[in-house]
Amino acid sequence: MQTTAASASSEHTIMATNSSRRTQTSQPPRLLDQVRHIIRMKHMSRRTEEAYVSYTRQFILFHNKRHPKDMGVSEIRAYLSHLAVERNVAASTQNVALSALLFLYREVLQIDLPHTGDACRTEPSVSELLLLYVGAEGFPSPDLGKPPNGSRFSRRAGAG
């Protein structure tokens, strides 16, 4: 029992020493930790935090570990094109990645990027639009043209 208490005490001492070394050198927090901190300060969801940190990490690794402050709109476009062409992600996924990178630049790095334009966003393909209209079975979607449930345009009595 004494050896367990002694080892726990030595582990605590090592952890305290490591944390004091970090504060003594006063290194700024790592970039992904800054992203996490600002997301939490803005009370954004954990799932948003996970997605934004993941896309930020992937963006950095895609550009051979270059720091984002040394990159700009052309690198963002290249990464988003890579997502669309090489990884074949959906347009909504590409938009989440763009939102993550815009958050990184605006909120964390406090860099105003020039207008990224619509070139960063993918448009749905004709087949995707047809699938929305026709549906997977080949028949027009029964929900097409109907307002969503709870909409203020609902035709139900007392709605709104």
Image (spheres, helix red, strand yellow):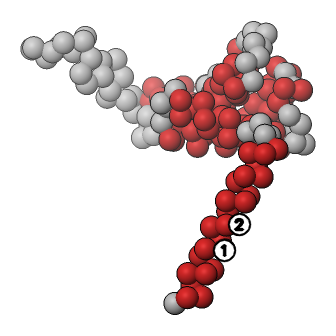
Query: Secondary structure beneath disc 2?
Result: helix
Left or right: 65, with 153 as reference point: right
The residue lying at 44 percent from left, 34 percent from top is 135
**Residue 125: numbered disc:** none
Residue 57, x across and y down, in percent: 74, 42
- Helix or strand or loop: what does disc 1 sit on? helix
User: In the image, what residue type sits under mark 1?
Assistant: Ser
Q: In the rendered image, which quarter is residue 151 located in? A: top left
Residue placed furthest toward the left: 157
Q: Note whether 150 is above or below 67 in the view shown.
A: above
For the residue marked with disc 2, what is the amino acid?
Ile
Distance from the alpha carbon under mark 2 to that under mark 1: 6 Å
Specify the quadrant of the image occupied by residue 124: top right
Q: Point out residue 143 in the picture as x, y percentages from the top left corner.
A: 32, 26
Query: Residue at left 75%, top 24%?
Result: 109
Number of numbered tags placed on the structure image: 2
Tags 2 and 1 touching, CB below 8 Å: yes
Residue placed under numbered mark 1 in the picture: 10
Indicate left or right for 100 with 86 as reference. left
Residue 52: tell me if it is visible: no
Q: Which residue is mark 2?
A: 14
Residue at image location 49% in from the left, 31% down from the top: 44
